[in-house]
Amino acid sequence: MSAFARVADPARPLRVVQVGAGAMGLAWMRTLTASDDVELVGVADLDVDRAQAAVRAVGADAKVDVSLGGLLAATEPDAVVNVTVPAAHAEVNVEALFAGVPVLCEKPAAPTLAEAVVQVAAAEATGRLLMISQSRRYYAALAEYRRRLAELGTPGLLTTDFFRGPRFGGFRDEMEQPLLVDMAIHAFDAARYLLDAEPVSVSCESWNPAWSWYRGDAAATATFLFDDGTRYVYTGAWCTDGLETSWNGQWRAAGSGGAATWDGEDRVTSSVSGAADVPPGANEQIGGALEEFVGALRTGVEPSGAIARNIMSLAMVEAAVRSAESGARVHIDALMDQARHDALSRTVREEIRARLESWEPRRR
C-alpha cells in the first residue's frame, strides 16, 4: 500500500513545474525536456529574465512566473521539481505539498536536520511524495559494486577516499564546512545504499590545510559505526591539486569473504569474482533520479530518495559537523531527537505540528 498519492493517468507524460533556473536549474530543464515521461509546463524563478532565457535555451513551451503559486494555478501540474538554493527548499516543498503536488527536490533537503524533519512531517500530513534527488546514487557501476559487496560475506570495513581541487568561487569558498556540508553527503548516502544499513554514531575531525583557498575546513576524516557493525571511514580534501580521485571518490570494502574496490567511475574489482568495466546506464545522475520519481508516482512504490528515508543521509552530515566542532562522538538517535524538538519549536502549520508530536525516524 502506497503512503502517497499516485498520478492517476500513466498514459500521458507528467506535467512538471520547475522552481529555480540557475546553472543547476538549466541542467534539470535539459533533463526534463529530453524525457518522454514528463512535460515541462512552467518555470518559476525570482529572476524572470533568467528563467525566460533558460526556457528559450532548452526550446521548451513553458510558462514563466516569479512565484510557484502563480504557476500552480495556471498550469495545474502533476509534479514540481525544486532546484532552488537549499535555504529555500522547505518553503517551496511545503507550498507544493499542501497544494496537493508531489515534489522532486535537489539535495540536501534543507540546511539543517530540523528543517528536513518539518518536511518529512509535511509529506506525511499531505499524503504526497517528497523525494530528494541524491543524484550520485544513480550509477550502473555503483549498483554493480553493491552486488559485489554482497559476495563478501559479513562486512567489516568500507572506506572512501575523496581528493579534488575545484576552485568554485562564490558561497562555497566562505562556508565553514564546505567539504562535509556540500559534498560529503553524496558519499555518506552511497555508503547507506551499499551497506543497506543505517548509521549509529560518528567521530569526525575536520581542518583547513595551510594552502587551502577555502575559508572553512576543506579536509576531514569521519568514522561512522553502522547498525550492522560495519565501520565506514570517509577521508577527503577539497583543496588537492594533482592525482585527483573521481568525483565519486575511490572505494574499498573488506568482509569475511574477501575485498572489493570501485574507482568511482566504471571499474569494479572483487577478490571473489574479478574485475569488470561497467558501461553507463540509460539514465544516470539526475536522469536516474527523475526516472525513479516518475516510476514511484506511476506505481506507488516508495523511492529510495523519499524524504523519510533520505533524512538519514543528511543526519550523517550534521552529526559529522557536530563531532568535528565538539571533538566528541555524536550519536545519530540523540541528534534526531534534538532535531524533532527543534522542529517543534518552529512556527509551522498545525497539520505539520500534529505529525511532529509523534514522529520517529525510520530505520529502513
Image (cartoon, rainbow, N blue to C red):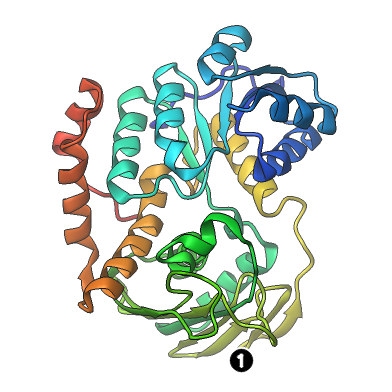
Residue linked to disc 1: 271
**Residue 350 at x, y = what percent?**
20, 21
Q: Tell me the residue at 67%/75% (across/down).
A: 246
Q: Tell me the residue at 48%/47% (across/down).
A: 305
The quadrant of the image that shows the C terminus is bottom left
Residue 222 lies left or right of residue 235; in this view the side is: left
**Residue 162 at x, y = what percent?**
56, 78
Q: Tell me the residue at 63%/62% (across/down).
A: 168
Amino acid type at circle 1 is Ser
**Residue 340 at x, y = what percent?**
19, 45
Q: Is residue 222 visible?
A: no
Q: Is residue 332 above or below residue 268?
A: above
Mark 1 falls on what kind of element? loop
| Quadrant in the picture for residue 80 | top right
Q: Is residue 147 above or below residue 345?
A: below
| Front in this rendered view, residue 157 or 1 | 157
Residue 202 lies left or right of residue 268; in this view the side is: left
Q: Is residue 128 visible?
A: yes
Residue 224 lies left or right of residue 280; in this view the side is: left
| Quadrant in the picture for residue 70 | top right
Residue positioned most to the top: 74
